Image (cartoon, helix red, strand yellow):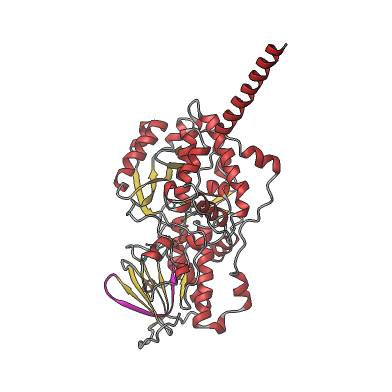
Amino acid sequence: MDLPFGNELPELDVLIVGAGLSGLTSALKILNKVDTLNVKIIEESPVPGGQLCSEGKRFVKQDQSELMAFLNQQNVTVDEAKEYDKIESLSRCWQLDRGLTSAPAKLELWRYINMLDNRMKKFDSRYKYRKRIPTMESHICKNLFFNLSRKFMYNLVTLASGVSAKDINFDEFMCLCSASGGVTLLVELFNCSYLTMPKSVQSLSCRTLLDTLLEKLNQNEIQCDVKAIKVEHFKNYVQVTDSTGQKHIAQAVILAIPCDKVNALQFEPQLPKNFRTVARGKEEKPKGQITEFFLSYDNSHWIDQGYSGQFLNVDPLVVGHESNSLEYSGYMLHTNGQADNVRDTVLDMLAAQFGDEMLNPVDYKQLTCELSSALHKPQVKPWNRIIWSSSASAATSNRNLMGGAVESGLRAAINALFIIRPQVVGWQDLSDVHERKNHSRDSPNYFLSLISRLNLYNVTFYSVFVVGLICLLGYGYNHSA
Ligand SMILES: Cc1cc2nc3c(=O)[nH]c(=O)nc-3n(C[C@H](O)[C@H](O)[C@H](O)COP(=O)(O)OP(=O)(O)OC[C@H]3O[C@@H](n4cnc5c(N)ncnc54)[C@H](O)[C@@H]3O)c2cc1C
């Protein structure tokens, strides 16, 4: 596509849209390379940070190598996950552990997740969606019998894809999971492992990370309360118009925002067809939101009651855990406009489990953000001067996690430098940000993959069939004798 030459002189070298972890990482990487460059970040919220809100903790895995190296470089300490060993002896409060159906529901959930992981190998980046494929909702209903396990899977689909299970089909979900490292990994990292709390995770304080990043960036470089609306691409620069009508002209633009937000921007000329998202249904659907809550108490009431503090309610999804002996945090999944009810819902649920003392926290804070939707094929560089990043655009097992935000932020920074100052980009930089491979998956064991296909429906069908056949043969034998 031929782009027009513009008549303006770019005042900025790089404009970054979005001051989440990905945008901040890009800015730091660019300025670390050439500190004289004119870099600006615009952010639609009143404060920077995005999903990395300033309270609470985030869990990280040691194998997120880029994130770990980045944290090390920034001198951000990562806490060991020792506290989980300590609290493991105490009981957890999970809806999945309660009731008569708990054991069979967990068993069929384990079997279903294994089945999805076993089939994942063929859903690689070259996979083409088939026609007339069931939605994830109907696939879950056909394979899972218990309400508890079905609801758990609906929540997982929403958390991983940003849309509800009826708006994404089986192929789309499998491709997305394949690019994100598999379903088991997603379950672990969403912090709601259905069997045990993962032991290998470490944690870090959001405030420490955010403060460290902001300290290293000049505050003038971040302009908050400014939303990008329109992106015009010229051959020699990009012009971004914000909600106040101000125009930002830069040699390169990094869109460090999730895919659904990218698609909400007006592009001129229009985005090439292969970079536009497929519309999922015409009518406007209520958007999924996630609210993170932070509570502090004068005592660990959950420990007094003999609980570890690990809490999981499936419908609605509320996940909670002890941050330290006096602090409690977690998140709740809900639809747009329900954020005001989160406090009461969460406190009532916690009080029902850990005692009425939970109703009176010393302090309560919450932060709501929209669920970011991810796509099967990550979107990287649709046009010469426009680069997309954000954790939802990473094509590795770190997608939708902090690791993905750092990984995509570093890649976007190198791409931007390659456009405006190619002479400072070395081979080492390029090899640092080369396309990462997804998890290499071993071929599934034949027996395991056979077992994983069994569910209550087909087991009942085959049992009735075999018993019927035996009765019929017995009847025939008796009559012929
Ligand atoms: C409750 C919760 C718990 C989590 N727990 C973990 C965890 O334990 N471990 C882990 O690794 N990850 C976790 N994550 C995920 C991790 O926090 C995110 O993946 C990461 O912070 C995303 O960073 P980002 O920069 O890609 O996107 P975002 O943080 O979403 O940043 C995008 C920014 O762009 C801004 N923006 C959007 N559109 C525009 C526009 N048009 N103009 C201007 N600005 C715009 C937004 O306001 C936002 O600030 C969690 C996320 C949540 C919500």
Residue at the far left in the pictured view = 244
Main SS class of the magenta portion in the image: strand
- 130 and 313: which one is in front? 130
Eyeballing the image, is 122 above or below 317?
Answer: below
Eyeballing the image, is 378 above or below 288?
Answer: below
Query: Is 348 on the left or on the right of 70, as rendered?
Result: left
- 386 and 60: which one is in front? 386
**Is residue 355 located in the magenta-colored stretch of the structure?**
no
Total numbered labels placed on residues in the image? 0
Residue at 54% across / 83% down in the picture?
Answer: 422
**Is residue 255 located in the magenta-colored stretch of the structure?**
yes
Q: Position of residue 469 (x, y in %)?
A: 64, 23
User: Which quadrant of the rendered structure holds the N terminus?
Assistant: bottom left
The quadrant of the rendered image in which ligand 1 is seen is bottom left
- 228 and 461: which one is in front? 461
Residue at the far right in the pictured view = 481
What are the residue bounds of the magenta stretch? 243-256
Query: Is 350 on the left or on the right of 197, as rendered?
Result: left
Q: Is residue 310 visible?
A: no
- 397 and 216: which one is in front? 397
Q: Is residue 422 visible?
A: yes
User: Which quadrant of the rendered structure holds the C terminus?
Assistant: top right
Q: Position of residue 410 (x, y in %)?
A: 53, 69
Q: Position of residue 317 (x, y in %)?
A: 42, 41
Residue at the far front in the pictured view = 480
Q: Position of residue 311 (x, y in %)?
A: 46, 38
